[in-house]
Image: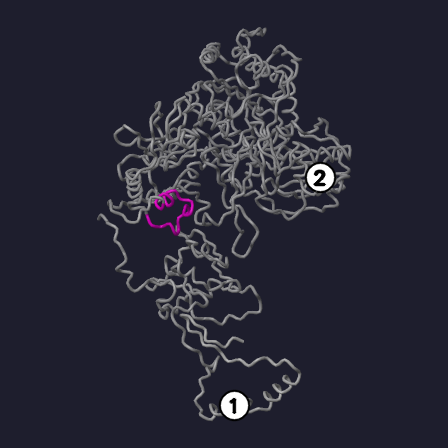
Amino acid sequence: MNKEVIKGSQNYIPVEIEDYPTTGWQKFKQVVRRSLGKELFVGLWVVLREMLKFNIHTVQYPEEVLPLPSRYRAVHKLLRLLESGNERCIGCGLCEKICIADCIRMETKEENGRKVVSEYSINLGRCIFCGYCAEVCPELAIVHGSRYENASEQRAHFVLKDDMLTPIDFLKEQKEFDGFGAVSPNADKLIKKTPLAY
Amino acid sequence: MTKFYIDGKEVTAHKGETILEVARREGIYIPTMCYISKVSPIASCRLCVVEVKGVDGFVLSCQTPPTEGIEVFTNSPELFQHRQNIMKLYNVNHPLECGVCDKSGECELQNKTLEFGVQSQEFSAKEQYRPIRNWGKIQYDPSLCIMCERCVSTCNEAIGDDAIELKFGGYSSEIVPKGSDVLECSECGECIAVCPVGALISTDFKYSSNAWELQQIPATCSHCSAGCNLFYEVKQESHFDNTPRIYRVKNDIEHVSLCGAGRFGFDFANSDTFGDFETAVSKLREAKTILFSSHITNEEIEILNQIAKTTGAKLVNPEARKFQQFLKAFATTSGETLYNGTLEDIENSNQIIVIGTKIATDNPAVRYAITRAYKKHRAYISYLHPVFDSTLQNTIKQFINYEVGTEEGVIALLADTLITNSNLDLDIGYLSGETNIGEEELETISKIGKRAKNRTLIVGSDLITHEKSENIAKYIGLIQKNSNVKVVIVPPDTNSLGVALFGNLADEVQAPTVGYNIEGDYTIASIGKCDFSVPALNQQEGTFVNIDKKVVKTNVAVPYRGKNLNDLANAILDNPKRWTIDYTSELFGVEFDELQDVEIVSKMYRVSGDVDEVEELPSFDGAVVYNSNPFLQFNPWTAKAIEEKPYLLGAKQFAIANKLSDGDMVRFEIDGEIFIREFKIDNSLKGVIALNPIFDKGLRSYKLLSKYRFQRVQIEKVKSNGRS
């Protein structure tokens, strides 16, 4: 075993490692030392000490849940326009197109001269939560939510439009999303205005 | 031949070619927005500008023929700037609604905007109120329109409807129906196809799918004998059903012009699975006669041939049999098994004579070729038919209205006119009198013919189904043999030519019969209620022989959950084949997948026959109807795909002669088939012959296809219109 100090810019620290036992006698000695030596009790003592201090850091999941950062990418949400309550999604299909896991499918139709999204689903069994859909969405309609508990009995596990869309009576509770794909704080400064003739 | 240079490359232009055409042929890219090769250059977009050494300013490459030795440059910083500015102008007030626009993803404005890197907009114009117009199957959104005029040119020059025009008004210009508030046209939808943006869209398809989600399946239209190449665009049926469904039909706009039936009549896939397989097999085994229609692929014909050979049954297809015998008689005087003209020949003609067909509805591709011949070469078109067709009045110079039933006399007169120094022994005075064709009319034809370089005679199914069809065919054979006139005999149904070539047909019908897509004692069909269901033609692969005598392929667009004819054959034949297309190599010597550019070549014969003398010509008195379908209809399959109410259409004269008024319900009988129709006065018609559609009659309409299309009928008024 090379015990020289390794020179170089990265400054590695060599770790002392005992030579491996080669003969049967040496192996026997190592087993006895490890199982009956005091090392065994060191670990037990550390646990006991922390227990007696009554200052435990364990998060009591599921009673207790840690707050998530806003850029966290969990199960998607479809948002509504805050003023009118209309769905933001215009059915452009960009999320469906950009999805690299190919797990988004939507169905559109015409209703009173407008394009309406009649069905929208994401197969969470396939979704890799990359966030491309939220990033590409021109209307900030599809965003990532914070629901990450999606254990399922099947590989294919779909969320449908109704599961993701903000219910109309909870519109007031809908928060403007500032996570993945959201408008950047300096967006106003970045916009170049188009000349308009009125 | 003109030699010149494009971007330093030496190229040669043929006579009449423009710089752009040469560049495209040589694979040199010049951006365009309004240019399509099938119409004359529109020159509205100005993107195709190029620089020519020694010439001040830019040159429009789409309409400028090159001169010897010029040096053309297709790209320079100035040109790029110029083109970028054009794109900026196109984008002024263009709604930013790509997210919901049907064209998004295949939009030429999107593509070119990106290509010329339009990052910002410096121009502005006052926004205007431009409401969306609904024209039935077509919707027009003026605010998305970029005024390239492709649609107007296509409608006028490639289709011949001349139904839309540009309403000039500077920035408020828009496309409007010509001469009326509503769009009156043949609903071919070609304007939708050529529109580079989402201004003209199909109302049915609107917002149902994004362009990139659809899978394109190349196929051949199965509605008429033109066999147009098209693409079925397929996606899952719905969100929760993965079965493919056809969402729309697209075509290669540079080379193919589709009709409305091809474009909108795609939804005829069979979803029924009636009948029991074992019964169907035993019925086929027992059948003495297998009846079939020409709505069939060549492979299926071969399968039927082999079944008939094994079971000893006779194959009967009355309509194709007539066509086969017509071609046989034609060969005796022409010395060739097939006619020598193609659609391309029609398009390049200077003189066209159409006889015995209502061509605009019988075969739209032929009509488009006629239109193009007129627009490109100012062709002189003579249309010989007892029924006046107002849809062709823009292109036709001479309309000759012969008497119903006198086709034999008409073709004899024509042969005499078209063949120089013909030694036909005709009683011209009698024929002219009986057919009602004036000698001066024939003189015009021969006079024009002397000047015309390329001449084409188009022969329709009235002549094929005529009582004296054999003699008529012989006269046509003479014309092909002894004159410079090319002949096109329009096959009456989708694959009539294929059946005539490959089918071992017989005449006699012996019970028990099995019908394949036609009514028999036991009916196997791909439509409606029948004894055993088989896939429709957009659910099958196979080949057709089209009007150009080319073998064209079609592919499976929609799956069929049931058995097809090959499965039935496998239960009967000794050497089963896995797929229907395994029979392709038996017919053409090439595997289906390798089949490409196969053309049926005419065999040469010694001329063996001569024309018979034209005897007494029949005359049709009383009420006469002509079996003819409207624009969007050809057969039961189009009737399934496009809902349309059939009307007996007649001119005012017909109404007066038969004491009918608009809206009356009438009843009449043709060959055992009872028709109960609402009568409608059509002001675009003339004369005393009414048009009777047969598309709604299901498989029974095939019985009428082999009959002479003019029929004398007893019209009975069932219910009077309240007003009369």
Residue B340 drawn at (x, y percent): 57, 21
Which dot marks residue B522? 2
The magenta region covers: B95-114
Q: Is residue A64 above or below residue B627?
A: below
User: Viewed as shown, does residue A5 lie left or right of A38?
Assistant: left
Q: Secondary structure at mark 2?
A: strand
Magenta stretch secondary structure, dominant: loop
Q: In terms of depth relative to the viewer, which is nearer, A41 or B339?
A: A41
Q: Amino acid at mark 1?
A: Val
Q: Amino acid at mark 2?
A: Tyr
Which dot marks residue B570? none
Residue B286 drawn at (x, y percent): 77, 37
Q: In terms of depth relative to the viewer, which is nearer, A106 or B83?
A: B83
Which of the 4 image quarters holds residue B6?
A: top left
The chain carrying label 2 is B
Would residue B704 be counted in the magenta stretch? no
Which residue is under mark 1?
A42
Would residue B112 be counted in the magenta stretch? yes
Residue A82 drawn at (x, y percent): 34, 64
The chain carrying label 1 is A
Q: In terms of depth relative to the viewer, which is nearer, B524 or A3?
A: A3
Residue B66 drawn at (x, y percent): 35, 25
